[in-house]
Image: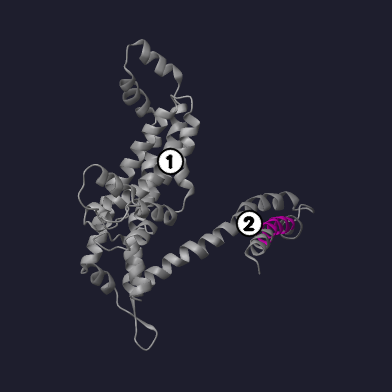
Amino acid sequence: MHPALQGLITIFLGVGGCLAYFSLSNLLLDTVICPARGPNAGRNINRANMIRPWLFLFPAVFVLTLYLAYPVYETLRLSLTERMPGGGSQWVGFSNYAQMAAEPKFWEAMRNNILWLIVVPAASTAFGLLAAQLTDRIKWGNIAKSIIFMPMAISFVGAAVIWKLVYDARPLEQGQIGILNAIYLGLGGTDPQAWLTTPFWNNFFLMAVLIWIQTGFAMVILSAALRGIPEETIEAAIVDGASPLQIFFKIKVPQIMSTIVVVWTTITIVVLKVFDIVFAMTNGQWETQVLANYMYDKLFRANDWGVGSASAMIIMLLVTPILVWNVHNARKEMR
């Protein structure tokens, strides 16, 4: 079947199935389960109103259970078992976690993930805030915002391919197609540099890709927050003789601090799950391993589902507190 036709059929069946479920379940509830007639009509109406929200929530709860809760449970189970040579598995408790903790590659991945967590959210949020402030002060600000936001439309793999060309290194006698090496040689450098194979610093070259992508996201959210600041506070600061820098750091930033924190934590979650960029550019070589790529290596290359699942649980444990904190803050803002 042609993919386009397959997609249309899937959309038709999905949307049609949802409409049919909500219509038929509502009809069944009102006419069969809790009919609004007879001596118990009032009680049935109240009962139907209590059941209806759960009836409508059932598809979402079912999908979340199937695609979220069950995979988490199964991953936890696999992390506590070991595959046997003849087939099947056996319970090994926390042996997979101990084996993982004994591997230098795991600690390399942890160290690099911490480095990414320190640099990427801070840089993306800072550049996004700077872009939001500057683009609001120029006539062609909307065009500038569109250009800055454009990388968000590119997949992580596509961005990795683009930046791999930027970092490309060729022998000195050949023409350089890598922009960074062309600039380096133009400024007086002697030999082209293999940027992605230089330990420690290559991590920052990989981080630049994610910062490039996430800056547009941060800019859009923070730009909306800046426009929501009451003009009266800014006008009062101007009357009091505050400089533009003082207005920005002492008036604007404190008023949008909650939005900055939300942007920061959202990018932090993205960083904890980063995989595509590292996989496409270095595949974890030259000391660039991260947790998600380590998990992939164990699961699909080493065929070690125990240690691979254990590393997946570590990623989930790192992400969960940030998600809970985000949800808590969102609920607090809604009160």
Left or right: 59, with 70 as reference point: right
Residue type (three-letter) at the residue carrying disc 2: Leu
329 or 185, which is in the foreground? 185
Q: CA distance from mark 2 to mark 1?
A: 39 Å
Say which residue appears at 32% left-offset and 12% top-offset.
241
Label disc, if present, on residue 216 of the rendered structure: 1
Magenta segment: does it hold 333?
A: no
- Tell me whether circle 2 and circle 1 mark residues in contact (CB < 8 Å): no
Secondary structure of residue under mark 2: helix
First of labels 2, 1 by sequence position: 2
Q: Which residue does the numbered mark 2 point to in the structure image?
A: 55
116 or 144, which is in the foreground? 144
Task: Residue 247: give x, y in percent of width and height.
Answer: 34, 21
Give, as a single range, the part of the protein colored magenta. Answer: 13-27
Main SS, magenta region, reads helix
- Please tell me in which quadrant of the rendered image residue 60 appears: bottom right
Residue type (three-letter) at the residue carrying disc 1: Gly
